[in-house]
Image (cartoon, grey):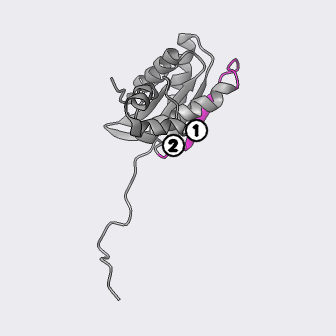
Amino acid sequence: MTTMNTSIAKSFAAPSISRAAASALLAAAHAACAEIGIEAAIAITDAGGHLKAFERTDGAAFLPVEVAIDKAWTASSFGLATHTWNALLTSDPKVAQLAHRPRVVAVGGGCPIVENGQLLGGIGISGGNYLQDQQAAEAALRALGFDVAA
């Protein structure tokens, strides 16, 4: 019987968005949507893609609920904004297979939540057109001092 090395690290600390920050980001996103003039669903996921906070304005349709959650999930999955996925899915045959994943969303409105280069989760907004959703998500991130990819 061989002896295993017991000095190896068996776990690591993983950064993730706090409940308080998720709530504050939800409020900032709601304000950004109101300023743009859209009724929307807003979802915040943690670094593992699990729903952390959610809100839907009174006038938002029901379809944006799942779309917003999936935008946040997509953004947190690889730390990439959803508006970048369309080019990725069409440019590389190996990446194109991800287009068949039911939750991957390749239109604007989903952004990774990043602080000091560390992925904390994702935000997804759905209710306006793809550019309005993207602008609202980016405005919310900026309002709280999170990194926004260029």
Picture coordinates of residue 97, whole percent (x, y): 47, 39
State whether the magenta stretch is mostly helix, strand or loop: loop
| The C terminus - image quarter | top left
For this orientation, the residue located farthest to the bottom is 1
Q: Is residue 133 visible?
A: yes
Measure the C-alpha gap from mark 1 to mark 2.
Answer: 14 Å
Q: Which residue is mark 2?
A: 49
Q: Secondary structure at mark 2?
A: loop
Q: Secondary structure at mark 1?
A: loop
- Asked if residue 78 lies in the magenta stretch, the reply is no
Residue at 63%, 32% (x, y): give it: 66
- Indicate whether 131 appears above or below 41: above
Q: Based on the displayed image, in which of its 4 quarters is residue 57 positioned?
A: top right
- Indicate whether 16 appears above or below 131: below
Picture coordinates of residue 11, whole percent (x, y): 38, 62
Q: Which residues are magenta?
A: 48-62
* Relative depth, front residue between 136 and 108: 108
Q: Is residue 21 visible?
A: no
Q: Mark 2 Cα within 10 Å, few/some/many (few <14, many 20+)?
A: many
Q: Which residue is mark 1?
A: 102
- Indicate whether 74 appears above or below 11: above
Residue at 67%, 20% (x, y): give it: 60
Residue at 38%, 30% (x, y): give it: 146
Amino acid of disc 2: Gly
